[in-house]
Image (tube, grey):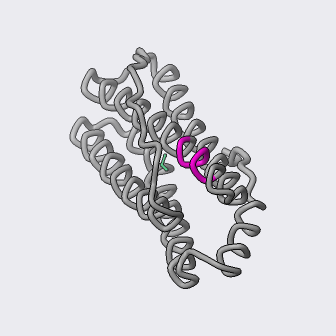
Amino acid sequence: MLSKKVENALNEQINAEFFSAYLYLSMSAYLNDISLTGFANWMRAQYEEEKFHAMKMYDYVLERGGKVKLEAIAAPKHDWNDIIDVFEDVLKHEQHVTRLINDLMSLSIDEKDHATVNFLQWFVDEQVEEEATVSDILAQLKLVEGKGSGLFMLDREAAQRKFSEPAE
Ligand code: FEO
């Protein structure tokens, strides 16, 4: 059985993951708009990944006999200055999500909820990977100053990304 505190915090995190999905979908639309269709594809895969995070948590709450409470999802931004601005926002957002996951982990430890601690470890590892991937892309975009043939090549590479659910 989940404590009320942990149940509420998991529900807040479900909302945060859906907001992440929404934010990345909005970025995908913007990237399409500025003709970076490869990065638009990359961001749409990121949207799929965030929905997967939300649903992984949703399933866990149900599995533990908790109550899922879906709340309104805040409107994301719609416009950015350029591709570097987009990825700077992605990195900031992922760092924010890492703090949320860490707080959730600390709460689960305080509540002596070992099952949730164990469950959240997957998210802790995932955040390390997400921050590293986004930092790399941002560094590459800065190397090519977000333009020209360098950007064209990075966009072609980003077009290759496909999201597939990780094996459990
Ligand atoms: Fe669900 Fe990008 O962290």
Q: Nearer the viewer, residue 55 or 105?
A: 55
> Which residue is painted at 66% across and 52% down in the image?
40
Q: Is residue 53 left or right of residue 163?
A: left
Question: Does the magenta portion include 88?
Answer: no
Q: Which quarter of the rendered picture does the C terminus lie within?
A: top right
Choose top left, top right, bottom left or bottom right for residue 37. Answer: bottom right
> Which residue is painted at 67% across and 81% down in the image?
150
Q: Is residue 67 left or right of residue 54?
A: left
Q: Is residue 156 above or below residue 55?
A: below
Residue 92 x/y as whole percent: 37, 59
Q: Is residue 24 above or below residue 81?
A: above
Q: Nearer the viewer, residue 32 or 155?
A: 32
**In the rendered structure, which segment of residues is drawn in magenta?**
26-31
Q: Which quarter of the rendered picture does the N terminus lie within?
A: top left
Q: How many marks?
A: 0
Q: Is residue 133 left or right of residue 7?
A: right
Residue occupying the far bottom of the picture: 143
> Which residue is painted at 37% across and 40% down in the image?
114
Q: Nearer the viewer, residue 104 or 35?
A: 35
Residue 2 x/y as whole percent: 35, 24
Q: Specify the principal SS of the magenta part.
A: helix
Q: Is residue 123 left or right of residue 9?
A: right
> Which residue is painted at 55% across and 75% down in the image?
146
Choose top left, top right, bottom left or bottom right for residue 120. Answer: top left
Q: Nearer the viewer, residue 69 or 138?
A: 138
Q: Is residue 66 visible?
A: no
Residue 53 x/y as whole percent: 54, 40
Q: Is residue 47 above or below residue 74?
A: below
